[in-house]
Amino acid sequence: MTTLVDNKKVHFNYEIGDTFEAGVELLGHEVKSLKKNQGSLDGSYMIVRGGEAYMVNTFIPPYQENNTPDGYDPRRNRKLILNKKEIAELASIEGDRGLTIVPISIYNKGNLIKVKLGVARGKKKYDKRESIQKREVDRNVRREFRDR
């Protein structure tokens, strides 16, 4: 299992609860682009519309700029492959106030491309400050042990 794209800010901006795994419907050149570790999950989220789940605002650049199909949108909505029970559960979570479903990472599983989704609740400013302070304390402790 190789991580292709990681959402670096998700643990800083959100508290992650449950996680889900979903397949993604991609075009061939999008798969090639992801395998070159290109793409970004910043600002992306998941919605359920018409009994289907979509990943919105995920940026996957074209693999080769000159060979890209006309009208290709790198931020297009991408359909997620889930079973009906998972879609119903995610739809009920999506309806809850204050909760959103965000992609955490895109990775290989065999020869398939999968997305790790997390149920997230946004952090307040003081929670983010607490995360920064904890990270700096851990960094200082590691530095002290390394120097000894």
Image (cartoon, helix red, strand yellow):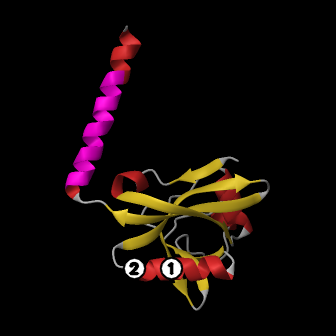
Mark 1 vs mark 2: which is more N-terminal? 1
**Residue type at tag 2:** Asp
CA–CA distance in space, label 1 to label 2: 13 Å
What residue sits 65% from the left and 57% below the top? 33
Q: Secondary structure at mark 1?
A: strand
- Please say whether residue 36 is visible from this viewpoint: yes
Mark 1 nearby-residue class (10 Å; few <14, some 14–19, many ≥20):
many
Looking at the rendering, the stretch of residues picked out in magenta corresponds to 126-141
Which numbered dot is residue 78? none
Q: Is residue 130 magenta?
A: yes
Q: Quadrant of the C terminus?
A: top left
Residue on which disc 1 sits = 47
Which residue of the protein is positioned furthest toward the left in this rendering? Answer: 126
Instruction: From this view, report whether residue 64 is shown above or below residue 54.
Output: above
What residue sits 39% from the left and 72% below the top? 99
What residue sits 71% from the left and 70% below the top? 27
> How far across and how far down the image is residue 25, in percent?
69, 73
Question: Mark 1 against mark 2, which lies toward the viewer?
Answer: 2
Principal secondary structure, stretch drawn in magenta? helix
* Image quadrant in which you'd find residue 86: bottom right
Closer to the camera, 86 or 133? 86
Mark 2 nearby-residue class (10 Å; few <14, some 14–19, many ≥20):
few
* Image quadrant in which you'd find residue 19: bottom right
What residue sits 61% from the left and 62% below the top? 115
> How far across and how far down the image is residue 80, in percent?
63, 74
Q: Is residue 54 magenta?
A: no
For residue 56, side relative to residue 129 (left or right): right
- Please say whether residue 77 is visible from this viewpoint: no
For residue 63, side relative to residue 133 (left or right): right
> How far across and how far down the image is residue 94, in percent?
45, 79
Residue on which disc 2 sits = 96
Instruction: From this view, report whether residue 62 is shown above or below residue 107.
Output: below
